[in-house]
Image (tube, coloured by chain):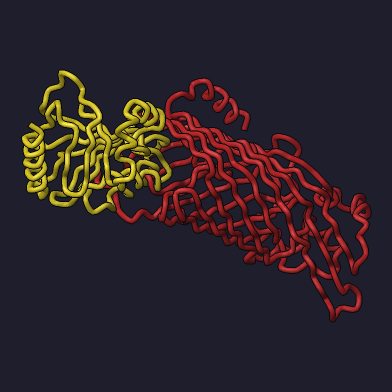
Chain colours: A yellow, B red
Amino acid sequence: MNLTIIHSFSVLVLMISKLHAQSLFTYATMAVDGFTCSQCALSVENSLRTLPFVSSVSMDINETEMKIFFVNGIEIDFFKLAKKVYESGFSVRHIRAVLAPEYIIAENQNLLLNNNAKYVILSHTPDKDTLNQTLLFVNHKMINKYEYEKYRKLYSDKFSMYKKRNPIYFVIVE
Amino acid sequence: MKAAACILLFMLPHAGMFAQELFPVAEPASTYPQKVPGIRLTKHYYLDQVSRSRAAYTLRYIYGVNKNLSIISSLTCSNHHLKKIPLNFQSYIINHHQRGYRDNPFIIEGINLYAKCRVVSLDKKSKHFRIAVYSEFAQSFSAHDRAEPNLLSDNTGYGYGIILTKLINRFAASLTWGYIKPFEYIQNNPDNVYVKQIRFKSGDALLYNASFGYRLYPLRYKSYKDLNINLYFECIGKQYESAQIYYDGKPYDQTILKEYDRYGYMSLQRGAYVDAKPSVQFIFKSTTRLDVGMAWPLYKRSFNHTYPLLYLSFQKLFFKTKPVN
């Protein structure tokens, strides 16, 4: 029984690893706190565009939210995305990444591997259509601090289990 | 000025939408974009008490060192002061504010290095509260002859302070409290038989600013190319000690000036004032800024300049990449 689970899991990991040349995500949305003007928005956008895995950024200045599109074949580092926002002098409100249609996360799946990154799935939004699945990142500094504290308390066991093994992304499947 | 104050007071209760804190005069607690250089050229202009043109040009180089630290270095050129205090000191002090006294030439007045470090940053959607501390050092190449110190160009010295800035959508408010310590200006004239040494020290000062900003246009952004129009109202205050003057080592009796030149006498005494500085700001393509403003006395007055004081400022930030849309 256990061997079957391990085998299935290995196949899944292998499948994802083999497909790594294709991007796991279609795009991501990132909301930023702390600014209201176009000068600040431009500073954040330009900062993000220096990252090699970012192909383009589309900013909604009024909502202080942006769509980030990625370069195919280059591993996406969401920690670096968040870091760029803080380096620009602002804070991340949330990061949501839309999975490419060929990747579907099953309801009982709690881990997703892609290249060097590990996505620890904390929960699934129930009764959600499996098309256009979105991952909400709940790592420290990837979501506003009140939300982060909420998720850290809610899933303290998983947070402590993976604490020192980066890069680990803690995500909610939406 | 009253009209500008009325407009601002009208806007304050409605200020729950979007905001600006790119104050033309005071520095906000927020820092400049990281690793983005910028320049700002400012002109201050006024007619002195005998209607002579007085102007100061300040060129600033701005740089965001990291997310918490920004530096600004400034070079100021003006026709406010002479390089040295003339040896006929008393005559100069009494007469140089009078009509007919020759105009001062434009000289490089001084340099200033200002560093601002953000220490608290609380961000929410379209809101933030920030606290920064700053310090500055100035080297003057001219002879300042007033009690009120000015570290931008007039005095050699140092200063430090704290800035609190709150941004709520369209509205921003900022408070600054600072201290200014001017060093003594010493002029040795070893070859002169009458005046061997002049020493002049402007008073130590406290400064306190309250700045308010409001984004008038656009109501909603369409792109980075949208013209921004921001209104500001700043109250810039200072409180300073009397000047100390030593003439060949002996304290100079400033009361002599009282009957000859009241303005000159007052400019050497301790004082406090608050200037009201309303301004309009235009931002082009999110990178280029033009500020136009004037200053009037709100409480007492400054003796470093007359009123109205006009200022015009142009700033450009040099981002490495350009926006797509």
Q: Residue at x 6, y 41 (%)?
A: A11
Task: Name the one closer to the observer, B322 or B4.
Answer: B322
Residue B285 visible in the displayed image:
no
The location of residue A127, given as percent across then percent down, is 15, 18
Q: Residue at x 50, y 52 (%)?
A: B70
Residue B257 as seen in the image, left or right of residue B31: right
Task: Name the one closer to the observer, A7 or B187.
Answer: A7
The furthest residue to the top: A127
Residue A61 as seen in the image, left or right of residue B260: left
The location of residue A19, given as percent across then percent down, is 8, 46
State the image quarter where residue A152 is shown.
top left
Q: Residue at x 32, y 31 (%)?
A: A157
State the image quarter where residue A161 is shown.
top left
Task: Name the one closer to the observer, A138 or B317.
Answer: A138
Residue B91 visible in the displayed image:
yes
Quadrant location of the N terminus of chain A in the rendered image: top left
Residue A28 as seen in the image, left or right of residue B66: left
State the image quarter where residue B75 is shown.
bottom right
